[in-house]
Image (spheres, helix red, strand yellow):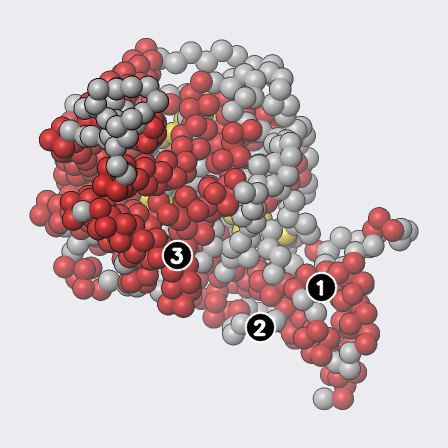
Amino acid sequence: MTAHPVKDFDPALPPEAPLAMPVQDLGRVPPRRGPLVATHATYAARAAAVVLAVVIAVFLTREMHAVLSVAKLTAIEIVMLALFATTIAWIAFAFSLAVLGTGALVYRRLVKRHFLSPRSKPSTRTAILLPTYNEDPARVFATAVATAESLADADVHEAYDVFVLSDTTDPDVWLAEEAAFLAIRAARRPRARIFYRRRMKNVERKAGNVADWVRRFGGAYPAFIVFDADSVMTPRTLVRMTLALERRPELGLLQTVPLLVGRWSLFARLQQFAARVYGPVMATGLAVFSGDAGNYWGHNAIIRTRAFAECAGLPHLRGTAPFGGPVMSHDFVEAALMRRAGWAIEIDASLSGSWEESPPSLVDLAERDRRWCQGNLQHANVLGAKGLHPVSRTHLVIGILSYLSAPLWLAFLLSGLMLALQAHFVRPDYFAADFLLFPTWPVIDSERALGLFATTMAVLLLPKLFGLLVAMISGPVRRGLGGPLRATGGVVLETLVSALLAPVMMALQSAAVFQILAGRDAGWKAQRRDDGSVPWSEIAKRHRWHTALGVALGVAAFAVSPAVFLWMSPAVVGLVLAIPLSGLTARATPRLAALGLLSTPEERTVPPMLVRARVLRREIAAALGAERDAVARLLDTPALAAFHTGTLPAPATPVCPATIDPPFVVASARLDAAGSVEEAIAAMNRAEIAALLSRRDGIERLVAKARPQAQAA
């Protein structure tokens, strides 16, 4: 793709169509749209899932009690029992969802086969939103162009507009985004319209970015589809989602289940394989359980604009970060508020053609998880909101427990070690204050403990087997996984590597929870999305304490007995090997790929949409040229300078203290004092450069400073 000077720009944005989006009151139930009554099948599915989970949790907790209660329970044993009961209830519920999903998928594939093929075109206009924050502009605009082209090829482009909504704060990325936008406009290729907007202040992060679009343009679009920076969806899927909203006036949000694609590191391929084999079972189970009170995951979903505007304006939570302030994990809350007002929220796990990318390494997953952890724990302040549907509250609880489970398992592990240490080193008290004929000391039923361990592992691992069996029913999926033998080998490999990584994830998530409880805010950073980009030095720095924890646990366990060391060995080995495990899994695995292990249908036959997006990314990157700083790019490209200046707001007049921008004042002073533009920019930080580029008088100052240099040259 070659960028040419553009003299007459199409508008960067369409005419505004404002739509009110009031902030919701969590303490007051709003007027409901109308009663939504779940089907008998949904009620039966929910009851079955809850009963099965309760039966499993009660049975395993009783077995644990029997293991520990050979003699009178000690204080440590009581703590262990409480921790086990809490964590096993979480595992049992996940197992029950897997059973629901397996039953539903087997029924659909063997008994009730149906193929949804939309034959009509959408009659309404839908916006496709690509929120971006300091992402690679070539990646973002490649997705935008690939989506627009595919809609044009499907002859439905008149029904869709694509918006790139930037919250970028890095000035270099900002100007590269504008240059990429001009490059695709100059090429004149996509027949679907693509618009670009950058907010001057990224208030309330992604939720505020989308809300700003709703308030400015939502009145012109009955529905909008949200992408993430790494999302890709086929036009067939987009049309099916739009038609679903048109045909069902009670439907407020429809969430797809995106598959993971596009990565070649071992860590990412493990995630992709797991999502392809086990994901459909779990997602279908959750969809069946949720019914019309489903959830929203922030992307790859279609939303009815009016319903969202009326119901999903998020309030600031009381207090300061990390628990107060803007809602971080906004998607769960937006879905809960829409369902509270009577709109159906559904998860459709049968919609194919919806993809996203996996983090390429454990370090990157931990970075993202730290932010998600804070957002999910923040939901504790939303649980008490009035009028929420019980299933919506369940989604919030699931989100909270998904991170609290890590420190609970760690506490259970440590309490077991303390119990062993107590039994080995602490002498029994024969002369307690209350006279007893026999001393009180910790005793466990080792034979029953082995049975409990086997049963617990079955509850943990059977969903993987369910997923494999369901995958083998579908011919295309079976072939895409490499056949039954390779698919089974992939499950074994994924299980082994995941078991080694699990203790490290447990430690990472536990640390995140403790940091959040201590008041540390996660902030908001752009995600790293490229394979093999984590240096070993960063990996060693992130995992050195995990290695130390593994060594300490191993030494303590071995000091008790070799048997205790063997019991602790899965956790000890994973933690001790944290650095090499994290580093090696972050690298590509061509040998495993050549053997066909961990392969997925999308890896063996890459969907055309993904191929096109990759080609476009390279073309747009070539059009942008080498990485350049924002000011140099602006001053060297008159068309870009004209476009950039035209998108800036008119200067505020008259100037008053409230309108003074300190970074702009500092940047202006540095520019005046410096001998050249380059010298001035070198003295500024990113916030100051961004402030200078955010105002028309700042651009004028830059141009005036650069003009004598250009004349001298």
Secondary structure at badge 2 equals loop
The alpha-carbon separation of the residues under discs 2 and 3 comes to 38 Å
Instruction: Residue at 64%, 31% (x, y): give it.
Output: 318
Q: Is residue 587 above or below residue 495?
A: below
Q: Furthest residue to the bottom?
A: 713
Q: Furthest residue to the left?
A: 485
Three-letter code, disc 1: Glu
The location of residue 46, given as percent across then percent down, is 32, 17
Question: Around disc 2, counting alpha carbons within 10 Å, would you say few (fewer than 14), some (14 to 19), or many (20 or more)?
Answer: some
Name which of mark 2 and mark 1 comes first in the sequence.
Answer: 2
Instruction: Residue at 17%, 34% (x, y): give it.
Output: 453
Instruction: Residue at 54%, 24% (x, y): give it.
Output: 337
The residue mark sitting in front, 2 or 3, is: 3
378 and 601: which is toward the camera: 378
Any part of residue 315 in sight: yes
Quick one: quadrant of the C terminus?
Answer: bottom right
Name which of mark 2 and mark 3 comes first in the sequence.
Answer: 3
Secondary structure at badge 3 equals helix
298 and 687: which is toward the camera: 687
Three-letter code, disc 2: Arg
Which residue position holds label 3?
545
Instruction: Residue at 87%, 51% (x, y): give it.
Output: 657
Which residue position holds label 2?
628
Which residue position holds label 1?
688
Apparent side of residue 302 relative to residue 707 in the rendered image (left or right): left
Number of numbered callouts drawn: 3
Name which of mark 1 and mark 3 comes first in the sequence.
Answer: 3
Q: Is residue 557 above or below residue 628?
A: above
